[in-house]
Image (cartoon, rainbow, N blue to C red):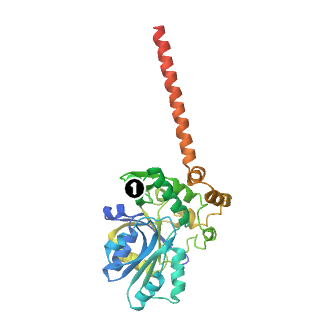
């Protein structure tokens, strides 16, 4: 039974390498390490070689590590719920991580409470269309004349935790970093229709523990704010509290105030954008280059860069002319 209000914590893993490899502050690694050390299994989402987000089952740290990092596309569950039930019926401890709707779906599928099941849900902005993601990848491959070999949805190592820059790596050795897919994502036109009516856009979640980036950490716990990643942890019930107590020795943590932690997805669903229908009409009929310029920010950025270049050229001409005039008067 979840509490009426969660307990809130700011969390960083003590091991800097773990935190660097994690999207947030390393709380998922700490919780899953505890389950694995007791012979349990972990279910979570990984990015395949074809850049699909799919669920896998891990009984070791190496496989679990593939679950780290963000995947801003809809994931494929496959037979995951069935496999989770089989593990639970075999008295195996299970950690299931996913979006709130996936956790709620798993519990509905199981139909009863299991003491060996521990659920971690992620504060979700919304789920973008895989169709748009695929079109984005093909567009980048055409621009870079090579197939995509690797993806980092949010490149924390090069750009820091706060910034949101996707980096693509290509088979020809090139790489490119941009915010095009991020801008499409945060424009909300690419989200699934159900996301605009999500019942979990509040502080109440179905997981035992809810985790997220700790946006607002500069107010809630400024001493944690080093741009390397901080986890927001909502402990929702007694099972979550017991699990958190077991891993505290691996963490740097501080209890914080809920009111200082209310990022937008903890308040309400994002409204359906007025231009959503127009976006999908453009996506179906126009080139992705057109879509990227109109909705992905590159048109504005290119215009801004072009404008700055023109200003610099004018200033340079004025300096040269001014210099010539000054020279002629000496």
Q: Is residue 27 left or right of residue 72?
A: left
Q: Is residue 287 left or right of residue 7?
A: right
* Towards the viewer: 59 or 8: 59
**Numbered marks: total:** 1
Asked where in the image residue 278 lies, by quadrant, the reply is bottom right
Location of residue 9 in the rendering, given as x and y in whole percent from the top left corner: 45, 68
Kindly state the secondary structure of the residue where label 1 is placed. Answer: strand
Whether residue 17 is visible here, answered yes or no, is yes
Residue 227 versus residue 193 in the image, above or below: above
Residue 42 versus residue 224 in the image, above or below: below
Location of residue 155 in the rendering, given as x and y in whole percent from the top left corner: 41, 56
* Towards the viewer: 187 or 271: 187
* Towards the viewer: 156 or 307: 307
Residue drawn 47% across the image and 86% down it: 82
Asked where in the image residue 244 lies, by quadrant, the reply is bottom left
Location of residue 146 in the rendering, given as x and y in whole percent from the top left corner: 42, 54
Asked where in the image residue 194 lies, by quadrant, the reply is bottom right
Residue 8 versus residue 114 in the image, above or below: above
Q: Residues within 10 Å of mark 1 (few under 14, many from 20)?
A: some
Q: Is residue 199 left or right of residue 318?
A: right
- Quarter in which the C terminus is drawn: top left
Residue at the outermost top position: 330
Location of residue 300 in the rendering, given as x and y in whole percent from the top left corner: 57, 45
State the residue position of label 1.
Answer: 170
Residue drawn 51% across the image and 90% down it: 112
Whether residue 163 is visible here, answered yes or no, is no
């Amino acid at each position: 039974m979840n509490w009426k209000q969660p307990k809130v914590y700011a969390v960083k893993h003590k091991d800097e390498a773990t935190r660097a490899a994690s999207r947030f502050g390393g709380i998922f690694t700490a919780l899953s390490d505890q389950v694995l050390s007791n012979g349990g299994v972990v279910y979570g989402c990984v990015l395949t070689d074809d850049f699909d987000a799919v669920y896998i089952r891990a009984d070791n740290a190496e496989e679990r590590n593939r679950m780290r990092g963000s995947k801003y596309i809809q994931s494929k569950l496959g037979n995951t719920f069935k496999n989770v039930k089989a593990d639970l019926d075999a008295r195996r401890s299970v950690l299931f991580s996913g979006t709130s709707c996936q956790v709620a779906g798993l519990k509905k599928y199981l139909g009863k409470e299991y003491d060996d099941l521990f659920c971690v849900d992620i504060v979700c902005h919304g789920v973008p269309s895989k169709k748009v993601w695929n079109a984005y990848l093909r567009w980048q491959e055409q621009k870079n004349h090579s197939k995509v070999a690797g993806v980092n949805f949010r490149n924390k190592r090069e750009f820091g935790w706060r910034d949101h820059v996707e980096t693509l790596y290509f088979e020809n050795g090139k790489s490119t970093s941009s915010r095009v897919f991020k801008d499409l994502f945060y424009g909300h036109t690419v989200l699934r229709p159900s996301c605009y009516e999500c019942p979990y856009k509040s502080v109440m979640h179905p997981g035992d523990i809810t985790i997220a980036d700790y946006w607002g950490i500069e107010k809630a716990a400024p001493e944690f704010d080093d741009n390397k990643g901080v986890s927001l942890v909502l402990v929702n019930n007694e099972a979550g509290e017991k699990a958190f107590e077991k891993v505290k020795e691996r963490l740097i943590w501080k209890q914080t105030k809920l009111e200082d932690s209310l990022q937008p997805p903890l308040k309400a669903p994002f409204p359906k954008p007025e231009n959503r229908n127009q976006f999908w009409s453009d996506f179906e009929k126009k080139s992705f280059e057109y879509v990227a310029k109109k909705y992905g920010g590159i048109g504005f950025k290119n215009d801004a860069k072009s404008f700055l270049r023109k200003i610099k050229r004018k200033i340079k001409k004025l300096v040269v002319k001014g210099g010539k005039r000054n020279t002629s008067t000496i």
